């Protein structure tokens, strides 16, 4: 209904506004064609201008043409004669009246105008139908997209974080489709209006201007692209060379990671971070070379924006840059690797992420703890995993036991060694051993040591070891409770 009302209103407006103007213009052209060639050559432009002036004056403000067109007799324009000027305006008024009367009498030009209006109406109707077809296509495509999205779209996840679900993704796509639909419709209307205006003489200049609003920028862009083609070839060659250099570095990185290529003093876990650093440096070098070939690179505005962005980044990312530098230092220090069990300050757990900015640890209670690399670099790190991989004997676990002097130390050693050998996930060779670490006032201090390579099972190993120690002393009839003494002083008699 809105489209039909729009078409009907536009047609009525065109008929009311353009019918008298086009009739007058066609009549003026016919009279000019019937005159002699010399007269046409000499006075074609003045007659058209005068006719248009007379028609406009008579149609808009009746009786104003004489007042406007005929100046006072005493008025003299500098450099001209008042009598010829007065004759020109009088001729314009007379010519406008003649053309107006001719249009009212002759029906031939009215038919021509009706044909033009019919063509304009046909164009408008066709464009309206085409707009309706485009909207129907977008509606159909949105329905197909809904069915496909509900079936195939999943959660948008970045490193275990859910960013958007299926409904949110579809809403974003629907918004993009709606914007595209309105852009296409506006472009169709923008093309329709100049084409319709082009059919009528009074609005041809307006049609040319409307076309120029679109064609002139496109022409400027096209000429700019043609002039920029040599720079595009240069930039393309630089990008291709950089890409092949990076691909070559990636090939050697994979070989080093898989230990198929061994470089003395260069560890395999250094390959990936070194490749990332070199890739960033190569891209930065590529941008520095390409910069002079970019359009507008020499303009002050472009350079000012570049400096502004650089200042903002440098001021707002000082701590981030510090963490990146610390991450680079940690990488080449090799204090731990992904999967190692470490103790960082008071936190014990497994390294699950080692990025350029942070290090993440998961504890035995499935707690994720994040440390900035600057803190990691300045903290004490204990790596339990290194002992079980690089050392063939494994990691040594120990437990302390105190026992009174009434129990022979040899018997205590036997119980401790027997309990350690019963513990699962401990190494038989080298076997467990006992150290007597202290002789206190009321008891002796013993330490049982066992080897293990199952670093990820350390809490379970300790738990079983303590159970076996308790069972061993219980079976031997020895109490694990240490004697405790309390001294009580007599009360003061003076109080």
Image (cartoon, rainbow, N blue to C red):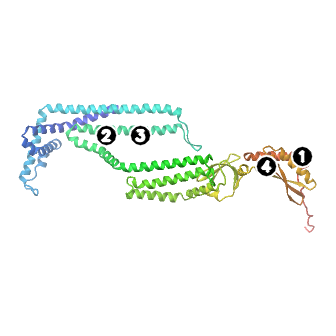
Taking the image as shown, residue 14 lies to the left or right of residue 384, namely left
Mark 2 neighbour density, 10 Å: few (under 14) some (14–19) many (20 or more): some
> In the rendering, at what x and y percent does residue 407 appear?
92, 53
Residue that label 4 marks: 451
Q: Earlier in the sequence, mark 2 or mark 1?
A: 2
Q: Earlier in the sequence, mark 2 or mark 3?
A: 3
Label 3 to label 4: alpha-carbon separation: 68 Å
Q: Which mark is residue 483?
A: none
Label 1 to label 4: alpha-carbon separation: 25 Å
Label 2 to label 3: alpha-carbon separation: 16 Å
Quadrant of the drawing holding the N terminus: top left
Taking the image as shown, residue 391 lies to the left or right of residue 317, namely right
Disc nearest the viewer among 2 and 4: 4
For label 2, the SS is helix
Q: Earlier in the sequence, mark 1 or mark 4?
A: 4
Q: Earlier in the sequence, mark 2 or mark 4?
A: 2
Taking the image as shown, residue 350 lies to the left or right of residue 196, namely right
Residue that label 2 marks: 190
Q: Which mark is residue 179?
A: 3
Disc nearest the viewer among 3 and 4: 4
Residue extending farthest bottom: 494
For label 4, the SS is strand
> In the rendering, at what x and y percent does residue 211 appear?
28, 42
Label 2 to label 4: alpha-carbon separation: 83 Å
Mark 3 neighbour density, 10 Å: few (under 14) some (14–19) many (20 or more): few
Label 1 to label 3: alpha-carbon separation: 81 Å
Residue 372 seen by the camera: no
Residue that label 1 marks: 474
């Amino acid at each position: 209904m809105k489209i039909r009302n729009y078409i009907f209103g536009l047609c009525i407006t065109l008929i009311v506004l353009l019918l008298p103007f086009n009739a007058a213009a066609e009549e003026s052209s016919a009279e000019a064609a019937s005159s002699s060639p010399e007269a046409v050559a000499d006075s074609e432009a003045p007659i058209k201008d005068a006719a248009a002036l007379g028609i406009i004056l008579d149609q808009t403000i009746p009786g104003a043409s004489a007042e406007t067109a005929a100046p006072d007799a005493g008025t003299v324009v500098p450099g001209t004669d008042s009598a010829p000027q007065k004759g020109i305006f009088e001729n314009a008024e007379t010519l406008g009246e003649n053309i107006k009367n001719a249009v009212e009498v002759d029906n031939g030009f009215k038919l021509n105008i009706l044909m033009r209006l019919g063509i304009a109406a046909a164009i408008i109707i066709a464009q309206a139908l085409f707009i309706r077809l485009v909207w129907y296509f977008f509606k159909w495509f949105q329905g197909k997209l809904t069915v496909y999205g509900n079936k195939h779209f999943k959660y948008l996840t970045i490193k275990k974080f859910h960013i958007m679900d299926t409904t949110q993704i579809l809403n974003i796509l629907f918004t993009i489709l709606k914007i595209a639909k309105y852009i296409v419709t506006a472009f169709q209307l923008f093309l329709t209006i100049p084409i319709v205006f082009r059919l009528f003489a009074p609005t041809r200049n307006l049609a040319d201007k409307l076309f120029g609003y679109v064609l002139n920028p496109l022409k400027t862009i096209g000429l700019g692209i043609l002039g920029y083609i040599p720079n595009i070839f240069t930039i393309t060659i630089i990008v291709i060379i950089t890409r092949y250099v990076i691909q070559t570095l990636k090939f050697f990185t994979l070989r080093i990671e898989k230990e198929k290529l061994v470089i003395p003093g260069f560890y395999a876990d250094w390959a990936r971070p070194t490749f990332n650093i070199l890739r960033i440096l190569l891209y930065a070098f590529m941008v520095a070379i390409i910069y002079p070939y970019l359009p507008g690179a020499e303009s002050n505005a472009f350079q000012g924006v570049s400096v502004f962005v650089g200042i903002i980044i440098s001021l707002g990312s000082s701590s981030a840059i510090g963490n990146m530098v610390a991450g680079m230092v940690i990488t080449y220090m090799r204090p731990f690797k992904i999967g190692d069990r470490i103790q960082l300050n008071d936190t014990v757990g497994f390294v699950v992420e080692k990025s350029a900015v942070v290090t993440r640890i998961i504890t035995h209670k499935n707690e994720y703890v994040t440390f900035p690399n600057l803190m990691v670099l300045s903290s004490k790190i204990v790596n339990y995993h290194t002992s079980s991989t690089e050392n063939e004997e494994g990691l040594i676990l120990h437990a302390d036991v105190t026992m009174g002097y009434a129990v022979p130390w040899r018997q205590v050693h036997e119980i401790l060694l027997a309990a350690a050998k019963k513990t699962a996930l401990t190494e038989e060779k080298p076997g467990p051993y006992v150290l007597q670490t202290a002789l206190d006032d009321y008891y002796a201090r013993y330490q049982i040591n066992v080897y293990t390579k199952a670093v990820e099972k350390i809490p379970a190993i300790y738990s079983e070891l303590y159970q076996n120690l308790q069972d061993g002393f219980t079976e031997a009839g020895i109490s694990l409770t240490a004697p405790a003494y309390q001294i009580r002083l007599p009360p003061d008699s003076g109080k």
